[in-house]
């Protein structure tokens, strides 16, 4: 056995595998992606008897050893032929749902026949008992010829026994007999493959005959297996079908000896009764809408307080540092670069934790699967599927965690489509922009005395974002040439109480992934934007400094006013300001001037930076949010060189549409790069979202001018 053995955690989807992983490893785990794919990879540490430290790999859920989807292939190859031989599986823990034992035992029997040391963990025994299923674990263990342990992931009952069994297997490294003698299906072919690799079991040889092209084998061995296939006319489909049929026959006999079940006609399951209501053709969609509305609102309601506390805390620290440290570029870099960038990262953490906590809550209770089921029919019409709905809903809070959540979609094309359109959802960062622009151009009036006109405009923006996302998904579905069949096969798990410890661990892990992975990229981008806004050509800066120094010397009483004017002039002549002037001819058809151009540039750090940028440009001192009314007044009174107002109805609505549709979030681009593994897709996303935003903003401005 290896010095640090690798334990693979296997099982069907919704069998309780992830909860067991969290129970075994706690927070001592790392989350990333498997090499070459966006399927989530979890590895944790587990100590056995304080002596041996094991690596526990949580593999994606799968129903059998005949893979179809990307995540199933990941689990399959990790067991059969891992890319990194140092991660070869030493022990397999197969998690089986006791309330759906017959289906789960198929996968269990297949793993057993690979001749890997196996421990079977039965979960959801309480649910099985309620459904009238009584399992004789000793008899079942004897029939399956492997250790079988009942574990309650909620209470931790059975974990010590599981660890003890792992310790015994580490010392003995023993395996049982074949569960089913597959040798008879292809006796000669199996024998010849085993001559090429004598470490293979009979069942392992069958899988080499079926899927050897996907394994890490040299060309000579690949060619030899091809010859064996041709020599014995090995029929993949026939062997696979007979294998599954024979296994179910044996499983039926095993269950007759070890399991007692009440007749299904004697009771209608509690979950089925609930599904009559939650999956109703009419009420089901209404309930789903209410649940999603509450989820969406809760992210705002709950996250508002910690986010405000973080912003105030960062502002307080920045203010104190400004008082303590001497003036200079180092202090400016520390406060407006490093601290501001750090604040821009951690301010998203409450939303990420709350969003994933609520999503995990829905998953644990079993309702998430119902949301996917109900929305699949709508989503499939534009090239998505039911699992796309949660990332898109999450995008209303923040696109970053929402895109991270898209990895739950197995089909690579549908996952990519979801990632590409989720940023069209109006995230919370857009709200400050929407609020201040709507207050400028939309009358503060009420329809029927109760419906706010400004509120209706805001709601219309959210609806428009969804509509554009659906339209773009439909078009991208035509152009993205990924030929992967999509089978929306979804098991509806039973309803159950949430596991709070599992929810807490998930929240912490998702926050860690964001801060330490995407956060590094965001920090670099923030520092670059600080430099662009702080520095400019030396000759221009010298002229400005000299001019305002002279003005102050002549009128010392107006020092504060001159400092604000100098700050504005320096901003205009910074590299960001020069860029604003440079793009002014491009944005003029949208109704924007160079000052708005600077805001468009700086908003790439985060959309809400628009408000702060406007505050600086229009010489409003103090925090932008605390002086929002003054800022509105300044923006409302802003004039163009010809004396006409800058923020007309045409310009205001044009800006609203632009900020709704444009990709102005570098953190989102960074996370898209991380999830797709390439800069290709974020660059495409940046180009087409900007093009759509530009075109529709142009149309709106021209129509309203």
Image (cartoon, grey):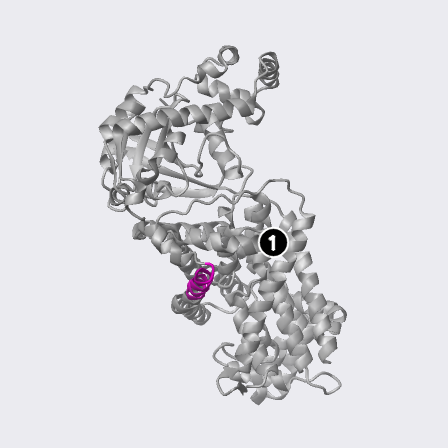
Q: Residue at x 53, y 13 (%)?
A: 189
User: Is residue 404 found left or right of 413 in the rendered image?
Assistant: left
As drawn, 469 above or below 599:
above
| Residue 485 within the magenta-colored segment of the rendering | no
As drawn, 283 above or below 20:
below
Quadrant, the C terminus = bottom right
Q: Residue at x 47, y 26 (%)?
A: 80
Quadrant, the N terminus = top left
For residue 173, what is the image quadrant? top left
Q: Residue at x 62, y 16 (%)?
A: 223
Front residue of this view, candidates 287 and 362 = 287
Front residue of this view, candidates 249 and 207 = 249
Q: Which residues are magenta?
A: 281-294
Front residue of this view, candidates 443 and 364 = 364
User: Is residue 467 found left or right of 82 in the rendered image?
Assistant: right
As drawn, 11 above or below 200:
below
User: Is residue 704 found left or right of 168 in the rendered image?
Assistant: right
Q: Position of residue 493 (x, y in %)?
A: 38, 47
Q: Position of residue 447 (x, y in %)?
A: 54, 85
As drawn, 248 above or below 445:
above
Count the numbered circles shown: 1
Residue occupying the far front of the picture: 265
Which residue is denoted by mark 1 in the rendering? 381
Q: Main secondary structure of the magenta part?
A: helix
| Residue 293 within the magenta-colored segment of the rendering | yes
Q: Position of residue 334 (x, y in %)?
A: 50, 62
> Is residue 51 visible in the rendered structure shown here?
no
> Is residue 118 visible in the rendered structure shown here?
yes
State the SS at label 1: loop
Circle 1: is it few (<14), some (14-19), or many (20+) Cα within 10 Å?
few
């Amino acid at each position: 056995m290896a010095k640090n053995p690798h334990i693979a955690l296997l099982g069907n989807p919704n069998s309780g595998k992830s909860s067991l992983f969290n129970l075994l490893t706690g927070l001592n785990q790392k989350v990333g992606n498997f090499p070459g794919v966006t399927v989530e990879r979890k590895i944790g540490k587990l100590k056995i008897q304080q002596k041996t430290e094991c690596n526990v790999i949580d593999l994606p859920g799968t129903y059998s050893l005949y893979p179809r989807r990307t995540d199933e292939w990941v689990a399959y190859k990790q067991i059969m032929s891992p890319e990194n031989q140092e991660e070869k599986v030493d022990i397999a823990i197969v998690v089986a749902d006791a309330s759906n034992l017959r289906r789960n035992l198929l996968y269990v029997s297949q793993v057993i026949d690979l001749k890997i040391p196996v421990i079977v963990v039965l979960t959801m025994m309480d649910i099985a008992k309620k459904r009238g299923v009584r399992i004789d674990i000793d008899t079942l263990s004897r029939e399956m010829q492997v250790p079988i342990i009942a574990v309650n992931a909620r209470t931790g009952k059975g974990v010590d026994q599981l660890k003890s069994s792992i310790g015994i297997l580490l010392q003995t490294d023993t395996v049982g007999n074949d569960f089913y003698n597959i040798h008879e299906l292809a006796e000669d072919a199996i024998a010849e493959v085993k001559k090429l690799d004598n470490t293979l079991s009979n069942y392992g040889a069958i899988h080499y005959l079926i899927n050897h092209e996907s394994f890490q084998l040299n060309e000579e061995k690949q060619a030899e297996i091809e010859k064996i296939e041709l020599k014995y006319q090995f029929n993949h489909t026939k062997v696979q079908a007979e294998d599954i049929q024979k296994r179910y026959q044996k499983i039926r006999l095993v269950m007759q000896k070890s399991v007692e079940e009440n007749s299904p006609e004697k009771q209608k399951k509690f979950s089925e009764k609930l599904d009559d209501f939650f999956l109703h053709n009419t009420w089901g969609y209404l309930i789903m809408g209410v649940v999603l509305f509450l989820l969406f609102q809760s992210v705002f309601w709950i996250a508002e307080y910690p986010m405000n506390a973080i912003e105030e805390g960062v502002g307080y620290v920045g203010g104190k540092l400004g008082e303590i440290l001497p003036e200079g570029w180092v202090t400016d870099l520390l406060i407006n670069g490093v601290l501001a960038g750090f604040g821009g990262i951690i301010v998203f953490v409450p939303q990420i934790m709350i969003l994933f906590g609520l999503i995990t809550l829905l998953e644990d209770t079993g309702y998430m699967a119902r949301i996917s089921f109900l929305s699949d029919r709508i989503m499939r019409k534009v090239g998505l599927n039911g699992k796309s709905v949660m990332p898109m809903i999450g995008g209303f809070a923040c696109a970053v965690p929402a895109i991270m959540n898209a990895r739950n979609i197995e089909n690579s094309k549908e996952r990519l489509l979801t990632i590409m359109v989720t940023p069209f959802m109006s995230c919370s960062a857009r709200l400050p922009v929407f609020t201040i622009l709507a207050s400028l151009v939309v009358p503060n009036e009420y329809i029927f005395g109760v419906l706010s006109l400004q509120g209706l405009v805001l709601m219309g923006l959210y609806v428009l974002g969804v509509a554009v996302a659906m339209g773009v998904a439909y078009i991208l579905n035509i152009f993205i040439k990924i030929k992967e069949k999509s089978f929306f096969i979804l098991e509806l798990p039973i309803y159950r109480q949430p596991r709070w410890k599992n929810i807490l661990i998930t929240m912490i892990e998702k926050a860690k992934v964001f801060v330490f992975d995407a956060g590094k990229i965001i920090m670099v981008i923030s520092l670059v934007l600080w430099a662009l806004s702080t520095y400019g050509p030396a000759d221009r800066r010298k002229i400005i400094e000299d001019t305002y120094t002279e003005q102050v010397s002549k009128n010392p009483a107006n020092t504060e006013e001159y400092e604000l004017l100098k700050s504005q002039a320096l901003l205009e002549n910074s590299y960001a300001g020069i860029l604003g002037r440079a793009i002014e001819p491009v944005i003029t058809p949208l109704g924007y001037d160079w000052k708005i151009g600077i805001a468009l540039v700086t908003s790439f750090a985060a959309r809400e930076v628009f408000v702060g940028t406007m505050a600086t440009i229009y010489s409003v001192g103090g925090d932008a949010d605390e002086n929002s009314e003054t800022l509105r007044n300044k923006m409302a009174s802003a004039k163009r060189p010809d004396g006409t107002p800058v923020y007309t109805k045409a310009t205001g609505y044009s800006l609203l549409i632009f900020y709704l549709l444009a990709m102005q979030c570098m953190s989102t681009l960074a996370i898209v790069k991380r999830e797709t593994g390439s800069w290709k897709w974020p660059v495409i996303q940046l180009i087409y979202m900007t093009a759509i935003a530009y075109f529709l903003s142009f149309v709106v401005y021209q129509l309203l001018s």
